[in-house]
Image (cartoon, helix red, strand yellow):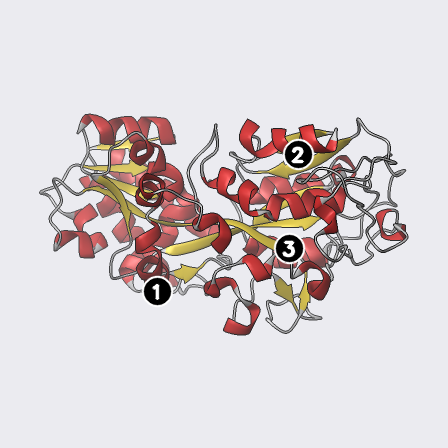
Amino acid sequence: MTDHTDLSRRQYVKTAALSAAATTALAGCMGGLDDGGDASTGDDGAWRDAELAAVPAAPDDRLYSADNTQSSGETIRHLTWSGYEAANVQRPFEKKFDCQTGVDLFTSNLDAFNRLDDGAWREFDHATFDMAWLPDLAEAGLIRPLDYEAWKPYTFDKYTDLFQRENGYEFAFLDEDYNFDADGQLYGVPQRFGWASFALNTDVVSESDARSYDAAWADEYDVGVYDLPFWGVQIVMLREGIDPYATHTDAEVERIREATVALFENAAGVYADVGSLNTALAAGDIDIAFVSGNWINGSLRRGGRFEHEARVPDEGGVIWVETTTMLKGSHPSVSTNYLAYMQHGITAKNLMWPTVGGTNVVPHQSSIDRLNRRQRTVLRIDDLQDIIDKSRFYTGVPDLDRLVSVWEAAKAEATG
C-alpha cells in the first residue's frame, strides 16, 4: 500500500453532509466456501436497503454455505489496495458464489475518501482503508456499523493476540465522538497490515548501523530516497524524536526541514516509484532505501533476495492496518458473505501471497499457521513481535499538508 497528500481531514469532515439516499438494491447471489448448506442470514435483509443500519452476521458459519434459491450472476464491488484483485483472492469467491467481483484500486486514502464523499459510495459495497480513516468515514456517514458479537466468530476470534479488543486493540472501534475506543462501536474489520521504516542490504549495512535511521544520513552508505512524503516525513520525525501524530511547533518543523535537506543531500538517488527503488536495491546501486516497508521490498524477498530487509530500528516504525468496511446504501444479498469470505483463513492466506501485488501480513492466526517456512521467511513472521513492539500505530498526521510542503522544499533545496 502507498499513500500521499493531505491528512488534516477531521476539520474538513466536520462540515461534510450525509450523502444522498441509497440506490436501488441489487439482486444478489449466495454461495459458500463449502458446497451445499443453507445460507440464511437469520435476518430479514432489511439492513441492505437502509442507509446506515448496523450489519448483522449469520450464526454457525452459515455465511460460508450456499443457498441455491437465490439468483446468481450479480456483482459485489470493492474499493481497495493492490493485491486484493489477485485471482487467487477473488476467483474462488466468484466461482463458488456464482458472482462477479469488481475490485477498484486506489493508492491514496484521501483521494479514495473524497471520491466516496463526492457520491461514488453508490458504486461500491465495501471499501478497505487504512484504519486512521475510520473516524472520518463514519463521521461523514459513509460506512455502516457492524454487530461485533455477530461478526466476532468470523473475525476477531481468528485474529492474533495483538488484534484482540480485550488486549487493547482499538483501531476498529469508535466512540460516540468518532474517536478510537476499544469499548466503542465496531465499524470495520482488520484485513492486512504492515510497517513503514527503511530497507537495508544486510550484506553491506552493519548490524550496529542497522539499529538507527542515522545510517541513512551516513556517508559510508549509498542511500536511495523514495519520494513518498506521506511516509517519509513520518520516519524523519521518528528519527528526530518528534511525535508524528501531534500538531508541530515552528521549532519542530525547522528541525524536520533541516533533517530532510540533509537526507536528500546525502542521497545517491531519488526514486519516484517502488519498481525503480527495488531495481536499485537489487542491482547494488543503493544499500539503503528510505523509506520502505514489507509492502515495498517484499517482492525482492519473494524472489529469494533475503539480504534485503525492511528493518525497524530503535527509533521505531509506523504500523498501518488496512480495515474493510461496509458502505452505506443498498447491498446485494451476497455482501455479508463476501465480508465473511475475505476474513476466511484460506482467503487471508492468499492475500498474504497474491498472484499480483505485494506481500503483506494479515492479522489472522489461522492464515499465518498455513504458511510454509519460505513464506514465513519472506513475510518476516518470526520478526513481527519485535517490529510491532518498536513501532507506532498510524493514527493521522494533523498538519501533514505543511510537512509535505517542507519535504518538497527540502528536496528542491538539496537537489536543485
Q: Is residue 227 above or below residue 151?
A: above
* Residue that appears at 81% across and 51% down: 41
Left or right: 34 as drawn, with respect to 351: right
* Residue situated in front as seen by the camera: 217 or 23: 23
Whether residue 128 is visible here, answered yes or no, is yes
Residue on which the image places disc 3 = 154
Whether residue 3 is visible here, answered yes or no, is no
Spot occupied by residue 323 in the image (x, y as percentages of width and height): 58, 51
Between the C-alphas of marks 1 and 3, the distance is 27 Å
Kind of residue at disc 3:
Tyr
Spot occupied by residue 145 in the image (x, y as percentages of width and height): 74, 59
Between the C-alphas of marks 2 and 1, the distance is 35 Å
Secondary element at image label 3: loop
Disc 1 versus disc 3: nearer the observer: 3
Left or right: 336 as drawn, with respect to 368: right
Q: Quadrant of residue 136?
A: bottom right
Between the C-alphas of marks 2 and 3, the distance is 16 Å
